Amino acid sequence: MPLLFSFVVILLGALLVHFMQQDSGYVLVNLGNFTIVTSFWFALVSIILATFLAIYIYRTLFSVIAKGKAFSFRRNEKKSQAGLLHYVEGDLLTAKKELSAVKQAKDQQVGEKSYVHSLMAARSALDLGLVDESEALLDQAEKSAAKSGEKNTTALAVNRTRVLMAKKEMAQARALLDGLTAKEKKHPAVVDLYRQIYIHQHDWPALINLLPQVKLLPLQGEQQYSVLEENTYMSYLNALVLQHSIAEPKTAEALEKLQSAWKSLPKTAQLNSRIVGLYCTLLARLGEDDRAEVLLRKSLKNEWHAGVVELYGRLATSDYKLQLSYAERWLEQHPDDPHLLFCLGRLSVKNELWGKAKDYFEKSLRLEPRPEVYAELATLMAKLGDAEKSQVFYRRGLELAVAKN
């Protein structure tokens, strides 16, 4: 094969020399006042050499440009890596400077990275409290996304929402999230932002509907979620009553809404002692102490809770005698509970059993001295005409309250 190729080259060369000897021809080039005359073969060789020279120059320039792009790409990569590392380390100021310095490149791959860098620089600026600068960086990120064809709108929306929240523009932040697709709204960051907005706006029904998704958040611990759930239901019930005046014409409406809301709560919430306690407090506020008494007794049967016990002693039921008899039965299982003794003391006062009330209050103080018990005992002593002891108990309660603070 090499011999055949060599033979062909020699043959073509011989033919070319033959034609050149037979007729050299000529080429006439007229450029204005200049006229160039040369042989055809010389012109042909010159054109071929000029073509090779142009190709060589083009390749050389292309190589130089490519090396320049590679250098710029490596420089961007170094800034990118350093910026991301500082962000992870918590050096937000340095991270913002380095990530902001990553240039937008014509290469699509680098362009997409520049979009991410702008987002992270914006997040760093926001964490530093530089809200306006963060917003400007988000505008830059949006332009980068448009140039590179980036389709991920969730990251941009999440960061813009954070900026709006930092500016206390909660309605605009919520509207921005509402504009996302159903799939984007399930993103953990979006769910958490909704949680924060609902709490800020006191939109408890919306937060209750969101709770199942909040429970699935990776950073939402079980205990943390339980506190959120409990506070949400309690805030919801409390808000319903606060929306209505305690005045007689609106009491029935408030009670109806409160009871309807209670029935809508899940069973787990209805068994929660703190939530039960708040619900019964609200019932009592609306004049439904007898309803509250029945519910509190059921709650204490399921779970003994100090706050619920003391609330039981504050109720103004229609039958104080029966209420006291129920509470005294609990002494068999909880003889040394200071909260129960305090409750019994209050109920004894309502039944005008002064001596029994005094004994219960004093036993409660011996087990756990508390300012509120001293205050009740001081009031009882004043009612019994013992002003000196009353002043002593008031003073002790005040000293204890100051010491605790």
Image (tube, rainbow, N blue to C red):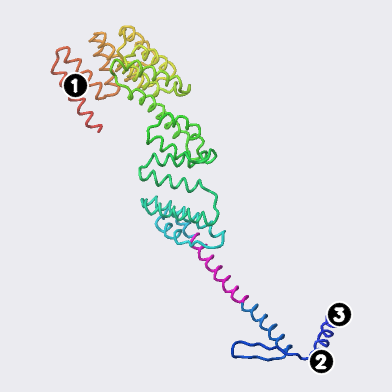
Amino acid of disc 1: Phe
Q: Main secondary structure of the magenta part?
A: helix
Q: Secondary structure at mark 1?
A: helix
**354 or 174, which lies in front?**
174
The reply to whether callout 3 and callout 2 are in contact (CB within 8 Å) is: no
Q: What mark, if any, has residue 4 been given in the picture?
A: 3
Badge 3 local density, few (<14 within 10 Å), some, or many (20+)?
Answer: few
Q: Residue at x 37, y 36 (%)?
A: 200
* Mark 1–mark 3 distance (CA, rounded to whole Å): 124 Å
Q: Nearer the viewer, mark 2 or mark 1?
A: 2
Q: Give the CA distance from mark 2 to mark 1.
A: 138 Å
Mark 1 or mark 3, earlier in chain = 3
Image spot of residue 251 (x, y percent): 32, 16
The range drawn in magenta is 58-80
The amino acid marked with disc number 2 is Gln
Residue 382, placed above or below residue 150: above
Give the Cα separation between the discs numbered 3 and 2.
27 Å
Q: Determine whether the residue tagged by mark 3 lies in a helix, strand or loop.
A: helix
> In this figure, which residue is indicated by the disc labeled 1?
393
Label 2: which residue? Answer: 22
Q: Position of residue 147 (x, y in %)?
A: 52, 57
Relative to 179, does residue 262 appear above or below in the rendering? above
Mark 3 or 2, closer to the camera? 2
Badge 2 element: helix
Q: Nearer the viewer, mark 1 or mark 3?
A: 3
